[in-house]
Image: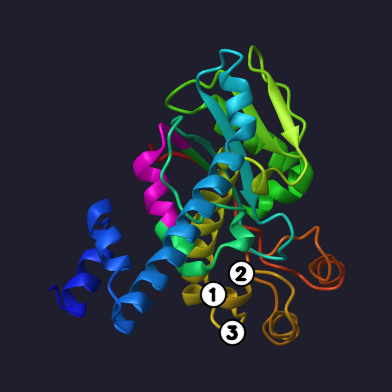
Amino acid sequence: MQSIAEIKAVLSHMPAGEDLAAWRRDERKGVQRLLASYDKRCARMAAEKERLSALLKPERALWEQGFIHVAGTDEAGRGPLAGPLVTAAVILPHEIDLPGLNDSKKVPKKRRETLYDEILHQALAVTVRILGPREIDALNIYQAAKQSMQMCLTHLSTAPDAALTDAMPLSLPGIPVKDLVHGDARSAAIAAASIIAKVTRDRIMVELNQTYPGYGFSSNKGYGAKAHLDALAALGVTPWHRRTYEPIKGLASRLALPPAISEDKLLKLK
């Protein structure tokens, strides 16, 4: 008879059906507790597999129409007072293994970091555009996001046959585009792009926190948290603050501010 420790080790993987049948007849309480835990884990895995399948529904509809390579695009950083706008575009294969994939705002930080690596490993193509505050101020945030999405989609290493966006209407020559409300929670490709964009931007904000200590960039990511607003009053405006956003706009009317950083990078990550 196998020990409970031995059964536990086997259950941590995928046991054979005959083993499971035999253990279900085992009257030891420890074995039955292990089986109950195993059954719950299997149920969670099945539910997650079903959720991921539903997340591919927009892509699947396009695949069935003959659009083989479907790209998703999303951004991070439209609302913050400071830091770049980061946009990403991703083409996923028709079969993915990305448990936990979702709108980046709904995914815990540790899992986002892991998903970032998994997406880069599994994706067919990934592009990222990083746009600085001077460009954001010159264009306005809506146009900056729109143009960045267009650029990311048109510079993928594999040309997309169709594209999905998170509620952003785009016009691309020869590429049908469908904009989905709450797209980052409804489409796997958009969700993947949201993960890539957010992780990239968060890492930049952690770096900026080293250059400009006192603003709390590593924690608030440039949003208008109280500590950030207090730092603006005490320390002034950095080159990474957006001059067209309040309260920076109000400060600019009264004070001489340093020039805003200009940055425009397009990265082909895969």
Magenta stretch bounds: 115-126
In the depicted structure, whether residue 189 falls above or below residue 85: above
Q: Check disc 1 and report the residue beneath it.
A: 218
Q: Residue at x 46, y 63 (%)?
A: 111
Q: Who is closer to the viewer here, 21 or 4?
A: 21
Residue 259 rendering spot, x and y as whole percentages: 66, 60
Q: Check disc 2 and report the residue beneath it.
A: 221
Do the CB atoms of the residues marked 1 and 2 lie less than 8 Å apart? yes
Q: Which amino acid does label 3 sit on?
A: Gly
Does residue 255 show up magenta in the picture?
no
Asked whether residue 150 is in view, the answer is no
Tell me the CA gap for discs 2 and 3.
13 Å
Q: Who is closer to the viewer here, 243 or 166?
A: 166
Residue 201: which quarter of the image?
bottom right
Horizontally, is 222 left or right of 26 in the view?
right
Asked whether residue 151 is in view, the answer is yes
Residue 28 rendering spot, x and y as whole percentages: 28, 81
Q: Which amino acid does label 2 sit on?
A: Lys
Q: Who is closer to the viewer here, 222 or 231?
A: 222
Most common secondary structure along the magenta stretch: helix
Mark 1 packing: few (<14 Cα in 10 Å), some, or many (20+)? some
User: Which residue is the extreme one toward the left?
Assistant: 1
Tell me the CA gap for discs 1 and 2.
6 Å
Q: Is mark 1 on a helix, strand or loop?
A: helix
Q: Check disc 3 and report the residue beneath it.
A: 214
Q: Which residue is drawn at 28% across and 52% down?
A: 17
Q: Which quadrant is home to the C terminus?
A: top left
Q: What residue type is labelled 1?
A: Ser
